[in-house]
Each structure stands twice: as structure tokens, then as C-alpha cells.
Image (spheres, helix red, strand yellow):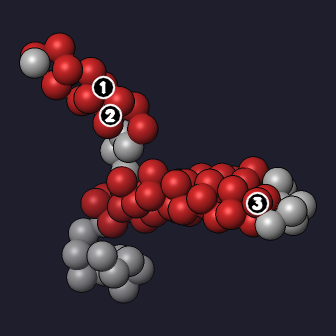
Amino acid sequence: MKLLKGFAKFWYDFIVGDDWRLALAVVIVVVAVVALANRSADWWWLLPTAVAALLAWSVVREMRRIVARQLPPGRPDHPAP
């Protein structure tokens, strides 16, 4: 049982990692592309485009979090949490 638990924990950490929102968004995009492809539509380009957009979204969120941690509260340029 310990081996099975470790195996499941590895795959969870590998797929979800640090951000469950990003993993969920990728799953939604993959499901949407599969659904559109089954309707004989040419939607292959949606997957790389969405992954690039999700990467940019993730980087912007992380940078905002880092900047918010470094600025003292009460400054006018302090971003809202």
C-alpha cells in the first residue's frame, strides 16, 4: 500500500505541481480540443496557443505575488492582493 501511495503522490506532484489552477486550465483546454477535433474541426492550433497564454498568465501572477511581497503595505504603487 505504501508503494501505491508513493506512486500516486509522485503523479499528483508531477501533473499538478505547485499550481492546481494551471493544471485544471490545461485539462480544460485539452478536453475542448478533443471535443472540437471529434466534430471534424481543425482546432489543433488551439492547444499550443492556450499553453502559451497560460504560461504568460502564470508568470504574471507569480511576478505580482513577488512584487507584492517586496513592497511595504500602504504605498500607492502596492498592488492589491
Q: Is residue 44 above or below residue 14?
A: below
Q: Which residue is mark 1?
A: 10
Please identify the residue farthest to the bottom as the structure is shown.
76
Question: Camera-side residue: 71 or 50?
Answer: 50
Q: Along the polypeptide, which appears first: circle 3 or circle 1?
A: 1
Tag 1 and tag 2, C-beta contact below 8 Å? yes
Label 1, secondary structure: give it: helix
Q: Which residue is mark 3?
A: 38
Kind of residue at badge 1:
Phe
- Can residue 64 be seen in this snapshot? yes
Residue 24 sits in which quadrant? bottom left
Dot 2 alpha-carbon crowd within 10 angstroms: few under 14, some 14 to 19, many 20 or more: few
Q: Is residue 59 above or below residue 9?
A: below
Please identify the residue farthest to the front as the structure is shown.
39
Mark 1–mark 2 Cα distance, whole angstroms, equals 5 Å
- Of the numbered discs in the image, which one, if any, rests on residue 13? 2
Label 2, secondary structure: give it: helix
* Foreground disc of the pair 3, 1: 3
Mark 3–mark 2 Cα distance, whole angstroms, equals 30 Å
Tag 3 and tag 2, C-beta contact below 8 Å? no
